[in-house]
Image: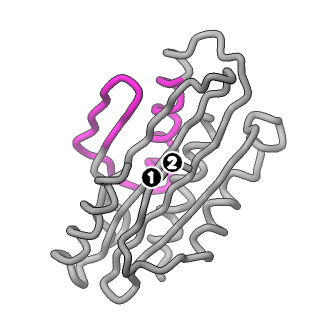
Amino acid sequence: MGRAVTAMVAAVAAGVAAAAAAAIAPAASWQPLPELVAAATGAHTGAARGASLVADAEARAWGDPASGCFAVVDTVAVPGPIADPAAAIADAHAAFAAELSRRGARIGGARTDRNESTADIELGSLRGRVRVRAELAADGHLRVTAAACAFNPRDRARSAAQCEQFWSTF
């Protein structure tokens, strides 16, 4: 796996942690990718976790290296109570986009619908989509789930179909 994949994963994790595990299912043929989980986990173990801004975090990653398709999901919980949930959700989305941009990703076609943002992403040879969803949990925590599914040009049609299947479970 190239640096673009690792950078995408780190951007997803750091973007979520800077702001703030859904039941997302990978394609049956995908394998768990612990090296990508390590990149995501490493990205949110820095200042945010050290300053107790993150109460809980979970990262998961899968892929089909043969076709060049990869997905990562990172979920964090920020301790509550949250005084202004709408502002906290907007901040989570803004921090996520800023972290992706900082890591060299080009973001296009961004769309936001209340508590969820979706955007197209290009990072190196990878093309795909990112989504971030923020919800205020019953316990007062802000739960932020970020996911990315991207692929290189190796087997574009197969990979695009695998990502669409992935997104249908988000």
Q: Give the range drawn in magenta.
A: 89-118
- Residue drawn at (48%, 62%), measured in percent from left and top? 72
| Total count of labels | 2
Q: Where is residue 147 in the image (x, y as percent from the top left)?
A: 44, 52
* Figure check: 29 above or below 170: below
* Figure check: 96 above or below 34: above
Q: Write down the quadrant of residue 79 in the picture.
A: top right
Q: Where is residue 155 in the image (x, y as percent from the top left)?
A: 22, 82
Magenta stretch containing residue 65, yes or no? no
CA neighbours of label 2 inside 10 A, class few (<14), some (14 to 19), many (20+): some
Q: Label 1's element?
A: strand
Q: Where is residue 42 in the image (x, y as percent from the top left)?
A: 70, 61
Q: Residue furthest bottom?
A: 66
Q: Write down the quadrant of residue 82 in the picture.
A: top right
Q: Name the residue under label 2.
A: 22
- Residue drawn at (66%, 56%), measured in percent from left and top? 43
* Figure check: 68 above or below 58: below
CA neighbours of label 1 inside 10 A, class few (<14), some (14 to 19), many (20+): many
Q: Earlier in the sequence, mark 2 or mark 1?
A: 2
Relative to 7, is 164 on the left or the right? left
| Kind of residue at badge 1 | Ala
Q: Residue furthest top?
A: 83
- Residue drawn at (61%, 76%), measured in percent from left and top? 35
| Kind of residue at badge 2 | Ala
Q: Residue 123 carries which label?
A: none
> In the depicted view, which residue is nearer to us: 8 or 30?
30
Q: Name the residue under label 1.
A: 147
- Residue drawn at (44%, 48%), measured in percent from left and top? 101
- Residues marked 2 and 1 touching at CB (< 8 Å): yes
Report the mark closest to the observer, 2 or 1: 2
